[in-house]
Amino acid sequence: MRTPELIVQQSDPETGRGRPVRVDALPEPTTAAEAGLMVGCPPAPHLRVSRQNWMAYPQSLWSFRHMEELGPAARIDRGSGPVDEFVRGEDTLGLADLNLEGDSGGNWDLAEFLRRTYTDALLVAHRGRLVHEWYADGMGPTTRHAMFSTTKTFSGLVALLAIHDGELALDDLLVDHVPELAGTGWEPVTVEQALDMTDGISFEEDYGSRDSSIMRYGFAMGFTPMPSRWEGPVGIREALRTLVERSTPPGESFLYTSATTDALAWAVARVTGRRWSEEVSARIWQPLGAACDAGISIDPTGLEIASGGMFATAPDLLRFGMMLARGGTNGAGEQVLPGAVVSDLVEGGEPDPDGCGGYATRAGWSFHRQCWNQYRSWGSLIPMGVHGQRLFIHPGAELVVMKFGCHPVTGNVFTDEVHQRFYEELLSRAG
């Protein structure tokens, strides 16, 4: 079993680059204004946020809310249709009276829970009504925030839509549509194995080591600046072709691998003939009734980062969760996604009783169709992204909890347990 480590992202005082650092205690939560980030004309060097340090804390307090200012991105157009307006209601869950067991002893009220989990926004919908809406200083309903791997659920959905439309099949090989992957570790991988990350590619998603697969992959896709004298691949598709080794036969076991999402997205783009941003806009964002455009970061070749580059507003991500909880319809009752596609996403996956992905905190979870899932064990699914991006969806209780964050620890497993207690408390009050 993997044990969560206290490794935070910090800015190196000598190079200005972000780096993983083992610490004895988490930094005290603050705000971008209190830290003085990007204040001044120009800001002092130690207060500047750039592509060099944007994932370090506290720089992330500013950067996660200004993604389009940090690098090139594609627009996810909301279109010209009507906004799916929220019906607002009273706090039926009694969030003001929250009394939650904290991570380090003692109990937390809601304000302390939000502070100690480095929350940027918390929106809660119950029985189709928005019952709670809170933003940290500097955030608001039109602020687009980094979603990181929550993006993967959108990538899974556009793949499922291509399958629903007959353009793709679960048992197709990825190389049937992307012959450029022939001769690599992807050659025997099917679309379904890529959807569920049972592809068996050798890949280490370790955010605590600058030499891990995910860190090198991040350099290639431009998510983190390439080191000087970088001789590795440039761009996602070139990086995918370098993955030639396998850890297990395809279909044998789950291993969380961000590169898999991008390989799947390549196949989807080939059969649809549209860019990822265009497909998400036309098939999800516009019919959803989103209030704002979203965006997605692109790699050095102009390709969207389908594994983790999306950014959107908190209300629009809540709308997305509410749509899934309703079986694919928006608030007006119009079908956004086919019911069969939503059912496949929500209800599938075989729970791992020992801890999905090797994490004891995820016992009873599965990973299905590019989304973390607790449906068969607990009735819910949780699209998630690093640094505290969580979208908890429980269709049976008609409960959706949208949470943006900037936690200094990259991996969400570090705060799984306190969030599970939070969701359990809300479900006990949901009726």
Image (cartoon, rainbow, N blue to C red):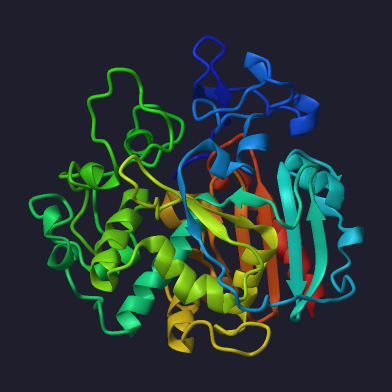
Q: Residue furthest top?
A: 14
x and y percentages locating residue 145 in the rendered image? 62, 49
Number of residue marks: 0
Foreground of the two, 220 or 380: 220
Q: Is residue 63 above or below residue 248?
A: above
Quadrant (top left/top right/bottom left/bottom right) for the C terminus: bottom right
x and y percentages locating residue 370 in the rendered image? 41, 63
Q: Residue furthest left?
A: 183
Q: Is residue 29 visible?
A: no
User: Which residue sits at x=40%, y=47%?
Assistant: 298
Residue 152, image quadrant: bottom left
Foreground of the two, 31 or 279: 279
Direction from residue 89 to residue 79 in the image, left or right: left
User: Which residue sits at x=22%, y=25%?
Assistant: 231
Residue 198, image quadrant: bottom left
Foreground of the two, 300 or 344: 300
Q: Is residue 122 above or below residue 344?
A: above
User: Which residue sits at x=58%, y=31%?
Assistant: 6
x and y percentages locating residue 108 in the rendered image? 84, 47
x and y percentages locating residue 96 in the rendered image? 91, 59
Q: Residue furthest bottom?
A: 333
Q: Is residue 383 visible?
A: yes
Q: Is residue 430 above or below residue 236?
A: below
Direction from residue 214 to residue 133 in the image, left or right: right
Quadrant (top left/top right/bottom left/bottom right) for the N terminus: top left
Residue 35, image quadrant: top right
